[in-house]
Amino acid sequence: MPSPPSVFPDVQALVVDLLAARSELAGVIVDETPPAGFDGTAKAVLVSRVGGAWVDDLHLDQPLVELEVYGPDKPTAHTLANTARAALLPATGTVHGTTTITDVVEADGPRWLPDFTRPQASRYVSTFRISVRPA
């Protein structure tokens, strides 16, 4: 059995690339960090690895990935959160470089979570467990 990788696959870049390529998210900021001057009112999906672990027996990395979804108002942010969710859930089998997504499970669905650092922002947050197999 191969040993655990010394560096985990960049799941944030994988999810950003996957979501940014979707036509239903055209015109939406999809990135790991917000652009300069971001106040939370633009349509955006920010992707962060927030936990997870290597599962040696399965030779899988199982990160928890959080999507922070912003919009100019609460209904728009909610619709965008559901669009991002619908784009990510069927990603099983996607290959990104030498990494394969073997499963995507919603750990915590879109929930309203005010962003106190951006008072004008409308934000929904969701968390996914994404199983990835490195080459």
Image: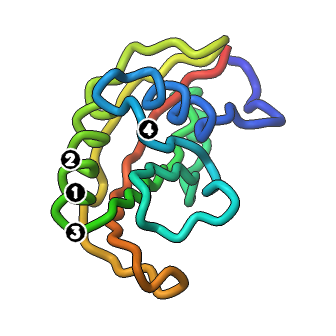
Please name the residue that numbered disc 1 is placed on. Answer: 76
Amino acid type for the residue under numbered disc 2: Asn
Q: Report the Cα–Cα distance between label 3 and label 4.
A: 27 Å
Residue 29 image position (x, y, % from top left): 50, 44
Q: Tag 2 or tag 1, which sits nearer the N-term? A: 1
Q: Report the Cα–Cα distance between label 1 and label 2.
A: 10 Å
Report helix, strand or loop for mark 1. helix
Q: Residue at x 54, y 84 (%)?
A: 117
Near-viewer residue (25 or 51): 25
Q: Is residue 70 left or right of residue 109?
A: right
Please name the residue that numbered disc 2 is placed on. Answer: 82
Near-viewer residue (56 or 78): 78
Report helix, strand or loop for mark 3. helix
Q: Residues within 10 Å of mark 3 (few under 14, many from 20)?
A: some
Residue 121 image position (x, y, % from top left): 40, 74
Q: Tell me whether the residue at label 1 lies in contact with that at label 2, contact meaning CB atoms closer than 8 angstroms.
A: no
Report helix, strand or loop for mark 4. strand
Residue 21 image position (x, y, % from top left): 45, 21
Q: Is residue 54 left or right of residue 80?
A: right
Q: Tell me whether the residue at label 1 lies in contact with that at label 3, contact meaning CB atoms closer than 8 angstroms.
A: yes
Q: Residue at x 61, y 42 (%)?
A: 54
Near-viewer residue (87 or 106): 87
Please name the residue that numbered disc 4 is placed on. Answer: 130
Up the image or down, 15 lies above or below 46; here it is above
